[in-house]
Image (tube, rainbow, N blue to C red):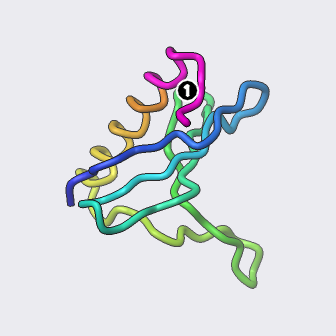
Amino acid sequence: MEITNIRIRKLYDETRLKALVSVTLEQELAIHDIKVIQGPQRLFVAMPSRKDENGMFRDIIHPITKEARDHLEEAVLQAYEEQKAMGEMQP
């Protein structure tokens, strides 16, 4: 599926959570609450999740293949870096 829009909804400075992101696929499917997180080695993308009855967090939606995950992560991180460089939020 083609990524047709990425919107950085909120930037954070003082936490490991660096941004909340929404992605639109093929102008037909929106995914909200994707997180950009600062890990020990690098920034990474965490998919929306919720806590199950055992207290474990489970992704609500996620890419199936490594290639799809890499494509999504690269696009989200690029949009994050561009937005951060602009120093302001999109309207």
Q: Position of residue 44 (x, y in %)?
A: 50, 38
Quadrant in the picture for residue 53: bottom right
- Kindly identify the amino acid type of the residue bearing the numbered disc 1: Gln
Question: x, y (%) of residue 51?
Answer: 71, 73
Residue that appears at 41% across and 32% down: 79
Q: In terms of depth relative to the viewer, which is nearer, 26 or 55?
A: 26
Q: Position of residue 35 (x, y in %)?
A: 58, 47
| Camera-nearest residue between 8 and 64 | 8
Would you say 31 lies left or right of 75 here? right
Q: Is residue 20 above or below residue 61?
A: above
Q: Residue furthest bottom?
A: 53
Number of numbered discs on residues: 1
Q: For the C terminus, which image quadrant? A: top right
- Indicate left or right for 61 with 39 as reference: left
How many other residues sit within 10 Å of disc 1, few (<14), some (14-19) or many (≥20)? few
The front one of 50 and 31 is 31
Residue at mark 1 = 41
Find the magenta span and give its range: 81-91
Q: Is residue 37 positioned above or below 41 on the image?
A: below
Residue 30 sits in which quadrant? bottom left
SS under mark 1: loop
In percent of the image, x 59 and y 22: which residue is there? 88
**Residue 51, relative to residue 19: is it above or below?**
below
Q: Residue at 21%, 60% (x, y): give it.
A: 1
Seen in the image, is 15 located left or right of residue 27?
right
Asked whether 18 falls inside the magenta stretch, the response is: no
Quick one: which residue is furthest to the front in this view?
A: 91
| Membership of 82 in magenta stretch | yes
User: Which residue is at a point 27% across and 51% down the rendered structure image?
Assistant: 3
